[in-house]
Amino acid sequence: MSQRIVSPCVGMCSTTVGDRVCRGCQRHDGEIREWFGFSDRERELRMLALDTLREQVAGRFLCVVDAQALEAQMCRHRIRFRAEQPALSRAVELLRVGRQRIRDLSRYGLEPVLEGEGLPPETLHVALTEALLREAYRRQQHDVLC
């Protein structure tokens, strides 16, 4: 029996305002348009690619020092995540949702590194989002759906 792969949509699709890549989920317009036509396996592979993208980019800004604390805070604040979603990919969602309320990243099991050092959460989120978009556009250029 196949497991249903839900959409990675976070409810803020910027492709509706002309972006080729969504600022919320990092899918490109072709993936968004075709998502529910993909096989379960194709959606699973694309979710894996999105998680990998987020892990690679977020790793330049953050380190997860306590994955259990991160998960507990995400549950506490009712931030949606998947059981198999890597911690750094979860951290991207945490910053997206909580960037204005978070004061101390260590309480969320996170530590700023490299490009994220010294940045307050809101500024960190902006820098991380910009870096994610740059990499997502590169990913989009290699996809046959474009």
Image (spheres, rainbow, N blue to C red):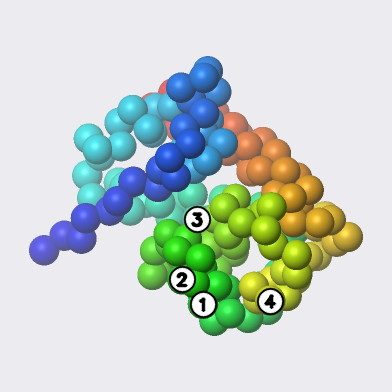
- For residue 51, the mark is 3
Q: Amino acid at mark 4?
A: Arg
The residue sitting at 40% across, 47% down in the picture is: 8
Q: Are marks 4 and 1 in contact (CB under 8 Å)?
A: no
Q: Nearer the viewer, mark 3 or mark 4?
A: 4
Q: Nearer the viewer, mark 3 or mark 1?
A: 1
Q: Which secondary structure, mark 2?
A: helix
- For residue 43, the mark is none
Please report whichever mark, 3 or 4, sits nearer to the chain's N-terminal start. Answer: 3
| Horizontal side, residue 4 vs residue 35: left or right | left
Which residue is farthest left?
A: 1
**Residue 70 appearing in the image:** yes
Q: Gap in Å between the C-alphas at discs 2 and 1?
A: 5 Å
Q: Nearer the viewer, mark 2 or mark 3?
A: 2
Which residue lies under the disc numbered 1? 72
Q: Gap in Å between the C-alphas at discs 4 and 2?
A: 14 Å
The residue sitting at 78% across, 48% down in the picture is: 123
Q: Which secondary structure, mark 1?
A: helix
Which residue lies under the disc numbered 4? 107
The residue sitting at 67% across, 36% down in the picture is: 134
Which residue is farthest right?
A: 118
Relative to 48, is 67 above or below? below
Q: Gap in Å between the C-alphas at discs 4 and 1?
A: 10 Å
Please report whichever mark, 3 or 1, sits nearer to the chain's N-terminal start. Answer: 3
